[in-house]
Image (cartoon, rainbow, N blue to C red):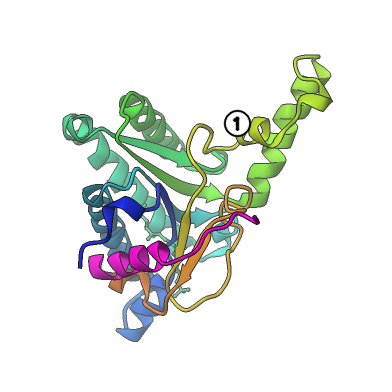
Amino acid sequence: MQPNPDNLPRHVGIIMDGNGRWAKQRGLDRWQGHTEGAKTFRRIGEHAADLGIRHMTFYAFSTENWNRSPREVAAIMDLFREYLTEARERKKENEEKQIRLRFIGRRDRLPADIIKLIEKVEKGTQECERFFINIALNYGGRDEIVSAVQKIALKVRNGEINPEDISENLFSDYMYTAGQPDPDLIIRPSGEFRTSNFLLWQSAYSEYVFTDILWPDFTNDDFDRCMEQYAGRNRRFGK
Ligand code: FPP
């Protein structure tokens, strides 16, 4: 059943989890799970755009994921390289579909060639306005908040901001997602019930859907079922 277009979330966050277990279940190496996970990422992104969702944030690599084996980290970096290269090659198509790509997270520690590719892809899509894809890469929610505080503190010190003018709205403008609505819905597959430092500030009133399905197995129908669950929620925003 097609999700009700009148009650779709404007912004959906997804914690792409379970790639390692998916691979293990099949006697494969962990990186092969990430390769499948990257395919799911592409497919779900396209599906969400077809449904009319405007903003998606995918959690791809956390500030803690550097602790994985060098081989696994290298394999994940290769997947980003591949995707970014593809995004550059598809510049025209992305423009036609009006897809804006943003990479949220710290740029330091990322390989120099990936940083360059990110800058090119972000610049090349910055005018696009229909579908926003954020990829959280070397991202941590607490880290994002601390970095916003540092930027605001600098402006206070320089006399550009009065401490009493610091509001929730102003603070949101210093988040990586500035200008975008907060996520209405966050999906976490793979049977874990944690938020894992994902969009801490932005998720204050997000609805959550947790499912047992491992990310590489996550189908478009599974996504539609998440939309149905969302549509059935009674959002009160604390009122
Ligand atoms: C968590 O699963 C997943 C990751 C740390 C990496 C996710 C990366 C991708 C899906 C590739 C993204 C690619 C692009 C192009 C955006 P896990 O390894 O923790 O799984 P486990 O809990 O089963 O071990």
Say if 232 sits above or below 86 in the image: below
Question: Extreme front residue here?
Answer: 239
For the point 32% across and 30% down, the residue is: 129
Q: Residue 114: x and y, percent? A: 41, 39
Q: Which residues are magenta?
A: 219-239
Q: Is residue 237 magenta?
A: yes
Report which quarter residue 36 is drawn in: bottom left
Image location of residue 178, percent across then percent down: 53, 33
The amino acid sitting under disc 1 is Asp
Residue hosting label 1: 173
In front of the other: 30 or 191: 191
Residue 148 in magenta stretch: no
Residue 238: quarter of image: bottom right
Front one among 4 and 163: 4
- For residue 110, side relative to residue 4 (left or right): right
| Residue 143 position within the rendered picture, expressed as x and y whole percent measured from the top left | 66, 47
Q: Quadrant of ligand 1?
A: bottom left
Residue drawn 76% across and 19% down?
161
Residue 236 screen position, x and y as percent: 57, 57
